[in-house]
Amino acid sequence: MASAGNHIECVKLLLNAGADPNGRRENICTPLYVAACAGYDECIELLLAAKADVNRRHTDVEWLTFLTDPLCVSVDKNHFNCFKLLLLAGADMTCGQGTSGLRYLTVSALQKYDNSFLILLLEMGLPLQVTDLKHAQFGMVEKFTPGLLNFLRYALSNPRSLQSLCRLTVRKFLGPENKTFFTDQLPLPNKLLSYIMFQT
C-alpha cells in the first residue's frame, strides 16, 4: 500500500524496519510491480536498493503472462525511467516468457513515439535475431513508429562496438542479481562506473 500510494517516507520506514521488499506471495502484487505500473521511479530505487527481486512476477498464474512482469508493465504504461531502472538492475528482457516475451517487449518498444525504449534495449544487448523479425508480430508495421523497425533491423544486423561489448561483458559478470547494487561496489573510476550504468 505504501508503494501503491508512492508514500516514500513510509516505504523507507518499512524497509528500515525489516519489511520484505518483495512483499508476500498471498498479496499477489509485489511492491515493485505496483511502483512500475504507476511510474514511481523513486519508490523503485528504494526497493531495488533493498534488494527487491527485479524479476519476480506479481502472480504465479501462468495465463496472465506478460503484464504480470514489472519490466513489461513499465514499457506498456510508457514509464521510461522505471523501465531503465529495472533493466539496469538486471531485469530479464524475456519477462520470464522466453522468446515470446522478448518479442512482446520489442514490439511494445516499436509502438512508442519515443525511441528511447528501443535504443536502450539495443544498448543492453537485445538478443533478438534478425531472422525472428519475420515473425507475425513484426508484421504489424502500421502500429509501429515510422522507421523504427528498419532501424532495429539495421542495428541487429551490424556488429556492436568493442566498447559496447566490454560493457555488456562486465554487466554479465556481475551476475543475475541486482546489478545496480553490485556495480556501485566496484573499485572503478567514476567515469567507468557511469559508463557501465549507461549514464554517459
Image (cartoon, helix red, strand yellow):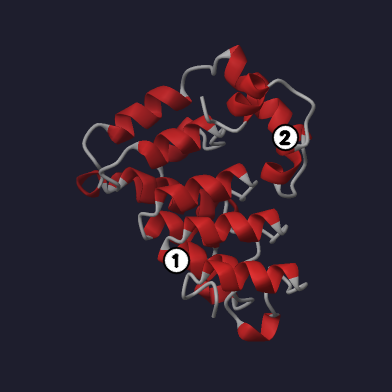
Q: Residue 92: x, y in percent?
A: 62, 50
First along the sequence among labels 1 and 2: 1
Above-or-below relation of 164 to 14: above
Report the disc number at residue 21.
none
Above-or-below relation of 85 to 57: above
Amino acid type assigned to the residue bearing label 2 in the image = Lys
Q: Secondary structure at mark 2?
A: helix
Observer-nearest of 53 and 169? 53
Q: Residue 125: x, y in percent?
A: 57, 32
- Observer-side mark, 1 or 2, equals 1
Mark count: 2
Give the labeled residue for mark 2: 172
* Crowd class of label 2 (few under 14; some 14 to 19; many from 20; radius 10 Å): few
Amino acid type assigned to the residue bearing label 1 in the image = Cys
The answer to whether residue 4 is seen in the rendering is yes
Q: Residue 97: x, y in percent?
A: 58, 58
Which residue is rendered at x = 78% and y = 36% of the image? 185
User: Which image quadrant: the N terminus?
Assistant: bottom right
Q: Tell me which corner region of the image, top left, top right, bottom left or bottom right, holds residue 161.
A: top right
Q: Secondary structure at mark 1?
A: helix
Question: Is residue 125 rendered to the left or right of residue 181?
Answer: left
Give the labeled residue for mark 1: 37
Which residue is rendered at x = 35% and y = 54% of the image? 78
Observer-nearest of 87 and 103? 87
Above-or-below relation of 47 to 194: below
Observer-nearest of 196 and 58? 196
Q: CA distance from mark 1 to mark 2?
A: 27 Å
Which residue is rendered at x = 39% and y = 54% of the image? 79
